[in-house]
Structures are given as C-alpha cells and as structure tokens.
C-alpha cells in the first residue's frame, strides 16, 4: 500500500499544532517537512527550531526533505529534531555516499532526491548502498514551491526505476513530490510509486480524510 506524506509547506503555519492535528485526522502516514536554504533553491522555508516545535505537536513520522546546498552538515541536527525519514538532493554539494551513511548511522530511512531533469543514471550506482525502507524521491516539480503543476515528463523515469528495483529485488520505495492530487497520484501509482507526497491538494481538501483515500486509490 502507498505511504501518504502530507506536505505542510502551504498549510496555515500560524497554527502549527492544528496543522498537525488535521494531518493526523486525515489518516496520512507521515508529515512532509520541506527545508529550503535560499541557496539550493531560490526560497527559504523553515528549519530546525520549527521542526522541534512540530515534533512536540504530533507522533506521526516526520519526513524531512532537505533542499539545501550542503545537507551532510545538517544530518545529525535534523535527526535530533525528530526526522524519521531524511532525504537530500543528489544535485547538492554533499558527497552522497557519506550523506547516506550518516543518515543510516542514526538508524533512520534515507532518501535520495532527484530534480525532474536529473537522469536516473546518476543514482543507479548508489542503489546497493541503500537499505530496506530507504527511498528514491523523484521530484515531479522543480523544487522550491508548492502548488505547481505536475511534470508528466518524469513518468518514464518512474517506470524505469520501478523496473530496476523489481529486477534487482531491492526493497526501496519510490517517492514522488509535487503536483500530486487524485489523478496524478493514480498515474504515479500505476507507474510504480508507493510513497506519495501531497501538499496543497491535501491541505486544501474540504475533507482531508477523503483526499487521503483518493490518493491511495480507494
Ligand atoms: C516543493 C516541495 C513539495 C511541495 C509539494 O519543493 O518539495 O513538497 O510542498 O506541494 P504540492 O503538493 O502543492 O505540489
Ligand atoms: Zn518536498
């Protein structure tokens, strides 16, 4: 079954504990937390103090997506702040093997994220390094903002990765992030995705629990 992770980037941040409750009540499996440093992407979101605050608001697993220039420097601090899934971009300046090893050193799931135009070939040599429950995040929008339109050109990359994982019997998840709503979720699930991030669609849904069901396809 698909893991559903709710991105709070465009939620009502004036009331963080209420946002956490809405996500919990929706039946989502995790809370997706987008960290932007103004360097790796041209936007600044929130960082460690807000994650510490959020950790006190919910028991849900926190799925932290680092869109920062040097993620390796921050691995320990985000784990201490409560991250249970931690993804970083292959396009960042950090050494990916060292970053994956650092995340594993804390006993949590590591994710390697790829921007829409980054070819799958760059991540394939790293797959044997990953453990069961880790994931590859294929961005379906350019990172930096919520509420963007899903980029359909990423679909062949999703299918190709699913084929590789199946062929090599690797127990890794494929996460997608950006423009995920009922229709694009169905297309992604069919292409082999089992870990969906949804922000504006889920947080603006009249009944978030219905939106989560639609994302799961039932
Ligand atoms: C974009 C972020 C996404 C974003 C998703 O850089 O990584 O997690 O919040 O928002 P929606 O679902 O609105 O595209
Ligand atoms: Zn994200």
Image (tube, grey):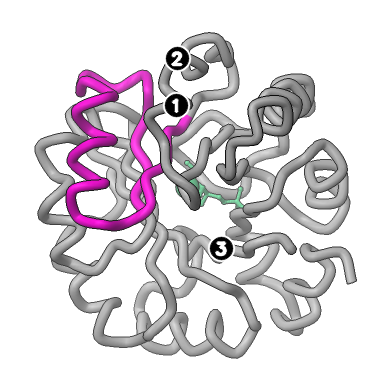
Distance Cα–Cα, label 3 vs label 1:
25 Å
Task: Residue 25: tell me if it is visible.
Answer: yes
Picture residue at 29% right of the left edge, 62% below the top:
83
Q: Quadrant of the C terminus?
A: bottom right
Is there CB contact under 8 Å for labels 3 and 2?
A: no
Q: Residues within 10 Å of mark 3 (few under 14, many from 20)?
A: many
Spot occupied by residue 165 in the image (x, y as percentages of width and height):
65, 31
Q: Which residue is mark 3?
A: 5
Is there CB contact under 8 Å for labels 3 and 1?
A: no
- Is 87 in the magenta? yes
Q: Which residue is mark 2?
A: 125
Query: Closest to the observer: 80 or 141?
Result: 80
Query: Closest to the observer: 109 or 25?
Result: 109
Q: Which residues are magenta?
A: 86-113
Q: Quadrant of the N terminus?
A: bottom right
Spot occupied by residue 129 in the image (x, y as percentages of width and height):
37, 29
Question: Secondary structure under badge 3?
Answer: strand
Q: Does 117 appear above or below 116?
A: above
Question: Secondary structure under badge 1?
Answer: helix
Q: Residues within 10 Å of mark 2 (few under 14, many from 20)?
A: few
Distance Cα–Cα, label 1 vs label 2:
7 Å
Q: Seen in the image, is 130 located left or right of residue 167? A: left
The image's mark for residue 128 is: 1
Task: Residue 177: tell me if it is visible.
Answer: no
Q: Write down the quadrant of residue 216 in the picture.
A: bottom right
């Amino acid at each position: 079954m698909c893991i559903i992770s709710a991105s709070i980037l465009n939620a009502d941040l004036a009331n963080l504990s209420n946002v956490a409750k809405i996500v919990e009540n929706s039946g989502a499996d995790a809370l997706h937390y987008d960290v932007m440093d103004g360097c790796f992407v041209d936007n600044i979101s929130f960082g460690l103090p807000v994650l510490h605050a959020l950790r006190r608001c919910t028991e849900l697993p926190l799925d932290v997506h680092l869109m920062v220039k040097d993620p390796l420097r921050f691995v320990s601090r985000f784990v201490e702040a409560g991250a249970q899934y931690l993804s970083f971009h292959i396009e960042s300046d950090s050494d990916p093997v060292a970053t994956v090893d650092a995340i594993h050193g804390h006993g949590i799931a590591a994710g390697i994220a790829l921007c829409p135009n980054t070819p799958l070939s760059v991540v394939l040599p790293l797959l044997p390094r990953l453990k069961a429950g880790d994931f590859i995040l294929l961005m379906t929008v350019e990172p930096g903002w919520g509420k963007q339109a899903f980029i359909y050109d990423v679909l062949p990359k999703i299918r190709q990765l699913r084929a590789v994982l199946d062929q090599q019997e690797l127990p890794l998840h494929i996460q997608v992030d950006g423009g995920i709503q009922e229709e694009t979720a169905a297309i992604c699930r069919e292409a082999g995705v089992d870990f969906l991030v949804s922000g504006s669609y889920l947080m603006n849904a009249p009944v978030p629990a219905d939106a989560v069901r639609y994302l799961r396809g039932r």
